[in-house]
Amino acid sequence: MDGLLFITHKTERFGYIEGAKAVLEGGCRRVQLRMKDEPVEAVFETARTLKAVCDGYGADLYIDDYPDVAMQVGARGVHLGKNDMAPGDARRMMGDGFVIGGTANTFEDMVRLKEQGVDYIGLGPFRFTQTKKNLSPILGLEGYGRLIGQCRDAGFVLPVVAIGGITAADIPALMSVGVSAIALSSSILSATDPVSETKKIIEIINNSER
């Protein structure tokens, strides 16, 4: 997992599909469908539609929370929060052909996810965000550097996706402490031109990786 990961978010301007189309048009090739508090039937129908859209752009689709939906629509993988199915159980259910990510806020979380065989860790939040309820303690730049360093000292390295209130201006510093990818939602969809904003963010990420 590297580059930009877009997390779908319903706004006054955009539905789940429309917002995803904007970032795909801007060059993003990783989209995570996140539909909290929606019936699973609605998640499945949206996922099926979004999978076809992503295929048209050569992009990977990930499903938040629902391994069964990810399997049914042929998504690239699933992301599991702390209150979702355990990643180890999801791996046994899904097999090795799917990417599985998990949410972490502490070093203990990261160790647990490593032991359960995740492919990447969604680490956050970077700062306060209104798109997520029951927010974990804020990490900030110092927290990311400390936790990634602890993982290295413990002898393991997993791709880390930074998430939570991140803006374009934060990206170079986050990449410099060892983050592999940046997850964004509101900062793109709230832009005047989400397509142009996506292009700008991808350029910043690419320049930060050099």
Image: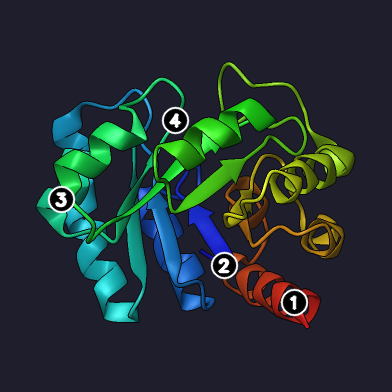
Say whether residue 125 is visible.
yes
- How many angstroms separate mark 2 from mark 1 (CA)? 10 Å
Q: Secondary structure at mark 3?
A: helix
138 lies above or below 52: above
Mark 2: amino acid = Asp
Q: Quadrant of the C terminus?
A: bottom right
Q: Earlier in the sequence, mark 2 or mark 3?
A: 2
Query: Mark 1 highlights which residue?
Result: 209
Q: Earlier in the sequence, mark 2 or mark 1?
A: 2
Disc 4 residue crowd, few under 14, some 14–19, many 20+, Cα 10 Å:
some
Mark 3: amino acid = Met
Circles 4 and 3 in contact, beta carbons < 8 Å: no
Query: Mark 3 highlights which residue?
Result: 71
Query: Observer-nearest residue: 205 or 103?
Result: 103
Measured from the top left, where is residue 175 in percent x and y? 77, 63
The residue that appears at 83% across and 41% down in the rendered structure is 146
Q: Earlier in the sequence, mark 4 or mark 2?
A: 2
Q: Secondary structure at mark 1?
A: helix
Say whether residue 10 is visible.
no
Measured from the top left, where is residue 138 in percent x and y? 77, 28
The residue that appears at 45% across and 72% down in the rendered structure is 29
Disc 2 residue crowd, few under 14, some 14–19, many 20+, Cα 10 Å:
some
Residue 81's mark?
4
Which quadrant would residue 192 be assigned to in this image?
bottom right
Measured from the top left, where is residue 123 in percent x and y? 63, 41
- How many angstroms separate mark 4 from mark 1 (CA)? 27 Å
Mark 1: amino acid = Glu
Q: Earlier in the sequence, mark 4 or mark 3?
A: 3
Residue 2's mark?
2
